Image (cartoon, rainbow, N blue to C red):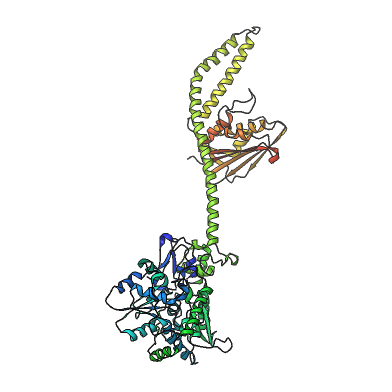
Amino acid sequence: MLVYTIKELCRTCYTCVRECPAKAIRIVGGQAEVIDDRCIVCGNCTKVCSQGAKVFLNTSDRVLKLLDGSQKVAAMVAPSFPAEFSDIPDHRTLVGMIRAIGFDFVGEVSFGADLVADRYKKLVSDNHNYYISSDCPSIVNYIRLYHPSLCDNLAPVVSPMVAMGRVFREQYGKDIKVVFIGPCIAKKAESPEIDEAITFTELREIFAEKGIVSDNISPTSFDPPEGGRGAIFPVTRGLLQAARISDNAITGNIMSAEGRTDFQEALKEFESGLISSHLELLCCEGCIMGPGLSKNGKQYNRRSLVSSYASSKMDYIDSESWQKSFSEYSDMDLSVHYKPDDHRIGLPDERDVNEVLARMGKTSAKDILDCGACGYESCVEHAIAIKRGLAEVEMCLPYTIEKLHKSVKELALSNEKLSSMRQALKQSEKLAHMGQLSAGIAHELNNPLGVVIMYSNILLEEAATEDPSREDLKLIVEQAGRCKKIVAGLLNFARKNQVNHQTVNIKKLVNQGLESVIVPENIKIEVSDLTTNPEAMLDSEQMLQVLTNLIKNAIDAMPVGGIIKITLEDTLSDMIITISDNGTGIKEEDRAKIFEPFFTTKSIGKGTGLGLATAYGVVKMHKGQITAESNDDPLKGATGTSFRIMIPRRKE
């Protein structure tokens, strides 16, 4: 595998997906993986990955091992070297540094470019067929994999690298080992005729490892044969200029395209018959922007450096010597035939694509944003990639953001419910402790209180009518009776006896509760029965006590009159009773304490503070819930209080 991912560095930005012309990047578990058999080794992903997660195979060690062998080794330097080594003004110094590594020969691939340009010129002069340039191995790989029907249109001429390799073996012997040094990753696997290939950045690493610097190197020239106009080959339309082919937009019959987007569009139009001309294609923006060069280089600056070198080269070149070498190798076999290797994947069914789009929340035309954040040009392309197993739904940014917002809302709701449950649990624990205490107090008071009540009544009956102590005895009997009610309330609050479940008509129970309460003339009571089945299994006596307590409290909260609304509702499993008033409301600081025993906002002697506590205990014994909502601030809207009781319809 020439290109791969360092998973620990991948930040899931999908930039590599966007930049891969072959869509050979698969996202699995949020990690980007290179699919080896789909990769055209263009290296775009390594160029754009800001985290360094996409890397290519480093073959420096293999080259150094080759140099340690007994056979002679030749280095072939790509004509784009001025774009990389601008820090070494004299190219001969660079040649000397390469020799210092251990190479026996150092030559220019630009001579191979001269030969290839000449062959290409002869091809395009024949108008019987239209050709696509074959000097870029990534373009060749792309056509073989994804446009296999165009393989016969690939120019049957080897690349300048392979041509120069053949020249070197003719020049220096068949057994010589050849190493290519250039800007391209794909060259590492382009042809078995080249023993090894390293990039310019790998060459810099070797210089650093061996301590080779330009200051202490003796300049030397390239070994023959010397390159000519092929030095301009790496820049845009360099093949045409090297071949001296007319670049006139009117008379020329060759179209050029470079970069991942343009070359794909050119191939599509060529295949569909919209273009009737030869194509010069490069996967990068010229070889001067290949993935094997140092990052952050400027395209036009690099072009200028290559052009300057080519111009100066043409000024000092020995034309006679070059022509002699060119004539010697002009008849060399530079032919090649490219075999198709179809890796196209059929389009999924439209219904399947729409199903994937629906999973991403794209159910209408307005949902199809085509924002490209996922790395694909359109939402449909993304959906197709998901169906093919190359992408994930979570790659869709709008979908992920919407899902995040939904999760935040759900989390907020869960926190609110948790807070409410925590408060309810705290209240239940508090009431449970108070219930135990109340039960103990009531039990201890019952016996002595019974004695006080009995003997005070006896003394009152025996006292003469004119006895001055009779009024005092009446007061004792009255207050003892009040104490009895308080104790009874405590027992009701903390009662542990079983609920006597029986089938009760809730509407009749409410009417019975209203009949047992004295309702002032200035208060109106409205009962709304919304139940589908008014029957439930309840303890009628206990629930009657709850209803009367709540109705009495509502009456007491409206001293100047008002309306009490009683609403009856039900579900399949629960019965719901809501008692609302438009009275004075409950102050905010008092709401957390309303169900506590002995807490009351009424004046002394008006209330015991056990009504709501008892109601709470009864509802809980029925496995139900009782909640209160209240507003005591007229500025915030209508005042009043609403108690909501929800009790299971059947005995649990």
Does residue 541 lie above or below 385 as drawn?
A: above
Does residue 548 lie above or below 571 as drawn?
A: above
Report the quarter where the N terminus lies: bottom left
Instruction: Name the residue furthest left.
Output: 70
Q: Which residue is located at x 55 percent, y 51 percent?
A: 409
Q: Nearer the viewer, residue 249 or 510?
A: 249
Does residue 6 lie above or below 242 as drawn?
A: above
Residue 394 drawn at (x, y percent)? 49, 61
Q: Looking at the image, can residue 522 be seen?
A: yes
Residue 457 drawn at (x, y percent)? 57, 13
State left or right for residue 376 relative to residue 67.
right
Figure quadrant of residue 554: top right
Q: Nearer the viewer, residue 258 or 545?
A: 258
Q: How many marks?
A: 0
Figure quadrant of residue 194: bottom left
Q: Looking at the image, can residue 389 be seen?
A: no
Figure quadrant of residue 178: bottom left
Q: Nearer the viewer, residue 639 or 30?
A: 30
Q: Which residue is located at x 54 percent, y 51 percent?
A: 408
State left or right for residue 464 relative to residue 400.
right
Residue 439 drawn at (x, y percent)? 49, 25
Q: Nearer the viewer, residue 173 or 59?
A: 173
Residue 607 drawn at (x, y percent)? 62, 26
Does residue 90 lie above or below 31 as drawn?
A: below
